[in-house]
Amino acid sequence: MAKKPSVKKATGKLGILLPGMGAVATTVIAGVHAVNAGKSQPIGSLTQMGRLRIGKRTGGTKKPLIKEVVPIQDLKKVVFGGWDLFDDNVYEAASHAQVLDQNLLDSLKRPLSKIKPMKAVFDKNYVKRLDGKHVKRGKTKMALAKQIMKDIENFKKDNKCNRVVMVWCGSTEIYIEESAVHQTVASLEKGMKENHKDIAPSMLYAYAAIKMGIPYANGAPNLSCDVPALVELARETGAPIAGKDFKTGQTLMKTILAPGLKARALGIEGWFSTNILGNRDGAVLDDPDNFKTKEVSKMGVLDQILEPELYPELYKDLYHKVRINYYPPRGDAKEGWDNIDIRGWLNYPMQIKVDFLCRDSILAAPIVLDLALFLDLAKRADMSGIQEWLSFYLKSPQAGKGLQPEHDIFKQLAKLENTLRHMVGEDLINHLGLDYYEN
């Protein structure tokens, strides 16, 4: 058996801070309150409902709940806070988002109304389709980051939290390429003091959290904790980080289907993907500059899974197209439609069509919760820097320098489960199984 690492117990309260308290964030918060009140179930959350195989298959397989194996924070000892450019409390914001049933929200009105957002760091140049008045003022981006850090300190004190984590739930910002300002902590901090244009608001939140040693995950495709400067800072401060872009609808389907097609050595001629979405995220992505950020995040999935350079006969000429269309009548009920042209034995053509009528925030909410709880677990296990084992939850997973991120959801899950086994000193499972048959 592997040496058991030291994982500190989950004592006291955990504060979960969410920049961007719109549809996704309020769905998470209301959902946890509903679960704690016995009104519903945390479906979709591995930390709450997932099981983990422990030991060999012989002698009775043990598959306890994950939270029975590793010390996950108790949901009844979690408190929420965050920032938004609108001053609606969580009850008002959730009612406006129209994701959850209003009767459920009304039954939770008292606790949800008490959660009010702090003023946000916001710049319309990075999210052109939004405008709000509940925003911070500061002469420099460094000054704004320090205001965020002060907010975190006050929140932790006011809510008597032992620990806090941060998960970005804000809108997709315009596309920014990594540049010289992002290379070192010194260059980033200099750029913040000089209001460098390539440092977006989301990066200020990431900097503030990581500077304080607080775990941070990026749920949008923005350039954020994945720049060298913040990776370096995370190692210095002991902050676990994970990014980027919650894997919810269409990309979830791709990371399930593409590994299966590749496993059977089936060729793929084309993969056309289109989405219609009517919530605030859809409105933001209706701007070409913001859409490009999302497009880059979504496009890399198939290349990494299929490896066309190794399988040119099957995937070299694959045509991959992604579109997102803002369609207000649909609201948060996103529809992702995929047409996949595949080739089988002797090059005979076939087609697969997928029409996923999903609910964007309903799929994202358990991801936010799991990322927060697993990052807190990583912090207590002294696992700082990039947490590649959390790639399972992300469209554009973060990996170490020189490494290609893993997109195959089944490999991602195996990595996540083995990391949990490693944390508590259980044997890792490789599914080889030869010892069951060899003498």
Image (cartoon, rainbow, N blue to C red):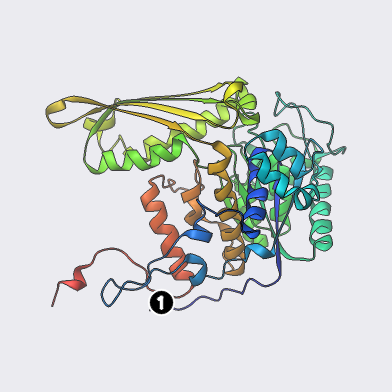
- Secondary structure of the residue carrying tag 1 is loop
Amino acid type shown at disc 1: Ala
Question: How many labels, in total?
Answer: 1
**Vertical placement of residue 309 versus 8, above or below:** above
Residue 160 image-quadrant placement? bottom right
Residue 399 located left or right of residue 320: right
Q: Position of residue 54 (x, y in %)?
A: 38, 71
Q: Could you say where residue 143 lies in the image, as x and y percent from the top left? A: 84, 44
How packed mark 1 is, by other alpha carbons closer than 10 Å (few <14, some 14-19, many 20 or more), is few
User: Who's the residue at 61% across and 66% down the image?
Assistant: 73
| Residue at (41% x, 77% y) in the render | 2
Drawn side of residue 346 relative to residue 255, left or right: left
Residue 187 in view (yes/no):
no
Of the 4 image quadrants, the one containing the C terminus is: bottom left
Q: Badge 1 is on which residue?
A: 2
Comparing 142 with 201, the one in front is 201
Q: Is residue 333 visible?
A: yes
Place of residue 417 in the rendered image (x, y in percent of width and height, measured from the top left): 42, 62
The image quadrant where one finds the N terminus is bottom left
| Vertical order, 180 against 275 (above or below) | below
Question: Which quadrant of the figure has residue 22?
Answer: top right
Q: Position of residue 90 (x, y in %)?
A: 75, 44
